[in-house]
Amino acid sequence: MKKGRVFSGARPTGKQHIGNYLGAIQNYVKLQENYDCIYCIVDIHALTTLEDTHLLKANTYDMMLDWLAAGLDPQKSILFVQSHVPEVTELHTLLSMVTPLGWLLRVATFKEKVKMQPHNVNYGLVGYPVLMTSDIVLYKADTVPVGEDQLPHLELAREIVRRFNFIFGETFIEPQAKLTNFPMVVGLDGERKMSKSYDNQIELAATPEETAAKIMTAFTDPARKFRNDPGHPEVCNIYRLHGFYTSLKMPEIGEKCRSAQIGCVECKRLLAENLNKALAPFRERRAQIAQRSGYVQEVIADGARRAQALARETLKEVKDKMGLP
Ligand code: SF4
């Protein structure tokens, strides 16, 4: 039976953290078993904010290195960088002809961005969903792994596809959402989603010492001022992180916290120990891959070649349908 084709893209955020791994990468790795997967670092999307553009190259390299170390396999999946297949920008232009402006101006994330960067409300921000649609349909992907919050974006992509197919005839597959319950990993500030932009992350590639030191800075139960105060694990993010890395001991840790038999320092040490144990194979693989001179670049170049072959076919079909000479 023919496998479905998955597409997913992620912005080049550099070294990946445990939130990226638990929320997306581990799912990417699993999907490779049952789908033809195309995973893309969407560097053009990153330009909509024009922040830290001088870091794009290094961030792209670090991210791909982490993906490979985490188990994304170039023999099974196409791994590439968005801008290396320029056909996506051509398709973006063509799809923009069938996308009513009203649809784009209503997108909630566009409105948020306008508030966040009123000094830079560029066309790229408005056209972002069209570029995202192009990313998916250029490779004729039928499945897109998404969290519930991303469903409206995918629905818009499906609407664009329907409109194109209605005007020019059946061309694109309507991509389906593959809903995944990504756990939302809260950062070391204990409040916001783990993210490099909040500087509250634990990087997968950090050394064991760096990891332990970072965990020691984490916020815990604010009501627990002294070692002998009983704690409330249900409000503590360290406790939640234990859930990912020390799950079997959760009831015991919870009980010891509530009865003040364990202090936060000890509790954090235990988490650091387990996290470092869990990440050791990743770190070893990462070091091995990093030593292979030019390997990451080869993977990226090969991914671009394979993605471009698919892209050219689609674009030819689209231009024919649209009547371009
Ligand atoms: Fe959090 Fe652990 Fe401290 Fe309890 S003992 S408040 S779970 S860090």
Image (cartoon, helix red, strand yellow):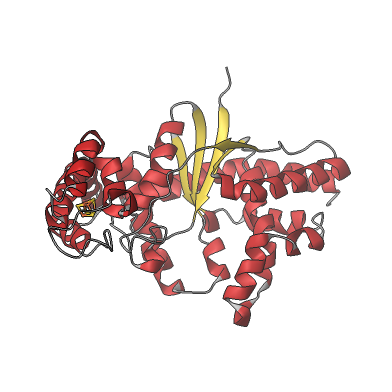
Which residue does the image show at 19% across and 48% down from the upper left? 257
Q: Nearer the viewer, residue 275 or 218?
A: 218
Q: Nearer the viewer, residue 308 or 232?
A: 232
Q: Residue furthest bottom?
A: 119
**Residue 238 percent across, percent down from the top left:** 26, 52
**Residue 140 percent across, percent down from the top left:** 65, 38
Q: Nearer the viewer, residue 24 or 96?
A: 24
Q: Is residue 71 left or right of residue 142?
A: left
Image quadrant holding the N terminus, namely top right
Q: Is residue 148 visible?
A: yes
Q: Is residue 259 left or right of residue 137?
A: left
Q: Nearer the viewer, residue 88 or 245?
A: 245
**Residue 114 percent across, percent down from the top left:** 64, 73
Which residue does the image show at 52% across and 64% down from the upper left? 46
Q: Is residue 298 visible?
A: no
Which residue does the image show at 11% across and 48% down from the upper left? 261
